[in-house]
Amino acid sequence: MKTTTRIFLIAHAPLAHALRECALHVFSDCADDVVALDVHPNAPPEESLASARILMEQQAERPTLVLADVFGATPCNVAQRLVDGQLSRLVCGVNLPMLLRAVCYRNEALDALVSRAVVGGTQGVMQVAISAPQNQIRRSHNDQETYHHQQ
């Protein structure tokens, strides 16, 4: 039987647990596969790392996709110290579309899951028109107002 990848969310409080709750809302069967650690503002990084290690050691035989919120911030720095590169991968910039894609494809190999998560996260970010497309004013292709920063 193929091993399901575990998804470990590490983010500024309360984002990690909020994202986990959203994932459970959509995929009620993912509770055992999604773990969350909220990094609190006044907690020393060593304390967050110790908590993360405890959570990571549970079911350590499973591959783990670690999703952190902001590259360079404390949750990401903790996550970088946590992943070993063998049975875990780290992706920063987590958003709900990324998480839902990862949960949906958690039965795939870890490297394939990383790609799916990143694509889900980037495709989930888009500008949406405030009215129906047929009511949008279309700009001509040579409209210089679009390129005002180049003038």
Image: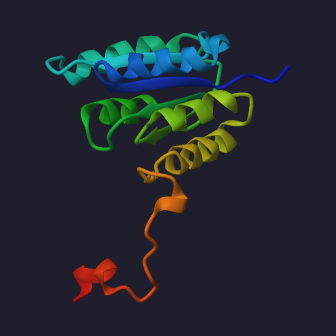
x then y, percent, for residue 125? 46, 48
Q: Which residue is drawn at 22% across and 89% down?
A: 151
Q: Which residue is drawn at 54% across and 46% down?
A: 118
x then y, percent, for residue 60? 58, 17
Vertical order, 32 against 145 (above or below): above
In this picture, residue 147 sits left or right of residue 111: left
Residue farthest to the right, as pictured:
1
Q: Nearer the viewer, residue 44 or 102?
A: 102
x then y, percent, for residue 123? 55, 50
x then y, percent, for residue 56? 49, 17
Residue 56 at least partly seen: no
In this picture, residue 43 sits left or right of residue 58: left
State which quarter of the image contains the N terminus: top right
Vertical order, 42 against 76 (above or below): above
Vertical order, 37 against 76 (above or below): above
Residue 120 at least partly seen: yes
Quadrant in the rendering for residue 50: top left
